[in-house]
Image: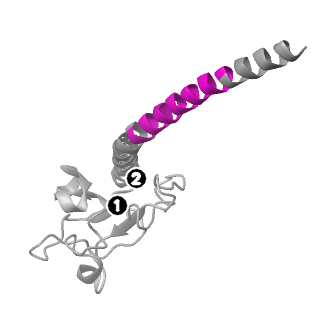
Amino acid sequence: MRILEERGSEASRRRWREIGLTLIELLLVIALISILAALGIPSLLQVFERVRIERAITDLKVIEFEVRRYEDIYERLPEDLIEADSRPRLDPWGHPYVYFKYGGPGWRGQARKDRNLVPINSSFDLYSVGRDGESRPPLQNPKSLDDVVRANDGAFYGLGRDF
């Protein structure tokens, strides 16, 4: 009986040594996966952000089409997006799109502007306030750099920082 116990304890120790090596290998694999994930996640987040920007650009083009269709029918720009039969839309970051018709007193102060402080469109602004949810009329303002804008009367769609 004693011989069996000694053999059992020796086998038990050997098994624990093997498990210990397996545990070290497992820890190395987990460390390697963690390093790869740490390197890959930022790239993946950039891809997701680019997809949000592209979706906002597509939405802006659809909304512009609705505004132009309204203008063709009624020979004037709508006062707001609801009047243009545009269903209420939120940008990919959960903020409503902004439509601003030029005209009336003080409109130049509210219009989106380029680096020379010239309005970026001739009749109306249409944009998303971007990820931070904040915006200022000059596109070079730090709060406007992440805005997705329609500029040059629809010839440019993209980030404020790229215009």
Mark 1 or mark 2, earlier in chain: 2
Report the residue marked by disc 1: 127
* Colour scheme employed for the rendering of this structure: one colour
Q: In the rendered view of the protein, which quadrant contains the C terminus?
A: bottom left
Q: Quadrant of the N terminus?
A: top right
Secondary structure, magenta segment, majority class = helix
Disc number placed over residue 70 in the picture, else none = 2
Question: Answer yes or no: do the residues labelled 1 and 2 have beta carbons within 8 Å?
Answer: no
- Residue at image position (23%, 75%) is 141
Q: Which segment is the magenta one?
A: 14-35
| Residue 148 in picture, x, y percent from top left | 31, 57
Task: Specify the quadrant of the image occupied by residue 129.
Answer: bottom left
The answer to whether 85 appears left or right of 61 in the picture is right
**Who's the residue at 46% across and 52% down the image?**
92
The one nearer the camera, 15 or 7, is 7
The residue positioned 27% from the left and 76% from the top of the image is 137
- Residue 88, given in percent of the width and then of the height, sits at 54, 56
